[in-house]
Amino acid sequence: MIGLFARTLQRRRIDGAIGEDKRPTAIRPEPLNKLSAKERQAVIDVCNVQEFASLPPSKIVPILAARGEYITCELSFYRILNAENMLHHRGKAKPRNSHKRPTSYTAKKPKKVWS
């Protein structure tokens, strides 16, 4: 009737009571320690300040901590910047170039490929 197999109910039963739904699609309440929109915006604003514009969160958080300011942890900085698509090269210097190296050298004639 409720769309669950008997084995699922047996697995969820804890001390006679049925435990919580552990399916990935289950509706769960928001965590109590979730950052508010104002806190998320504060992180974005700090990262866009001229002083921190070219620094990664791993350097921003310790500088703020030395000043006695704490917004959130370094991992949350990374998560927020990733969600806002701001987690890329932000400095004045050009980003690192990746050169494609040839996978193999093919000799068509003798003495054409040396290594």
Image (spheres, rainbow, N blue to C red):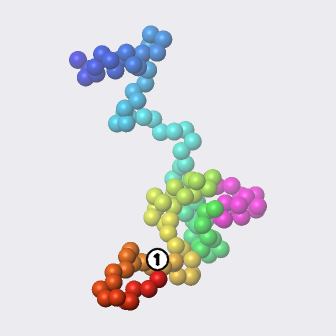
Tell me which segment is drawn in magenta.
Answer: 59-72
Q: Residue at x 48, y 79 (%)?
A: 97
Residue 35 % position (x, y): 55, 48
Q: Find out whether residue 38 is within the magenta segment.
A: no
Residue 54 % position (x, y): 59, 74
Amino acid type assigned to the residue bearing label 1 in the image: Ser
Q: Find out whether residue 64 is within the magenta segment.
A: yes
Q: Is residue 41 visible?
A: no
The residue carrying pointer 1 sits among few (fewer than 14), some (14 to 19) or many (20 or more) residues within 10 Å by Cα, namely: few
Q: Which image quadrant for residue 114?
A: bottom left
Which residue occupies the foreground of this view, 38 or 66? 66
Q: Residue at x 76, y 62 (%)?
A: 67
Residue 115 % position (x, y): 47, 83
Q: Is residue 23 above or below residue 87?
A: above
Q: Is residue 90 above or below residue 72?
A: below
Q: Is residue 81 above or below residue 23?
A: below
Q: Is 73 on the left-hand or right-hand side of 40?
A: right
The residue singled out by tag 1 in the image is 98
Q: Which image quadrant for residue 61?
A: bottom right
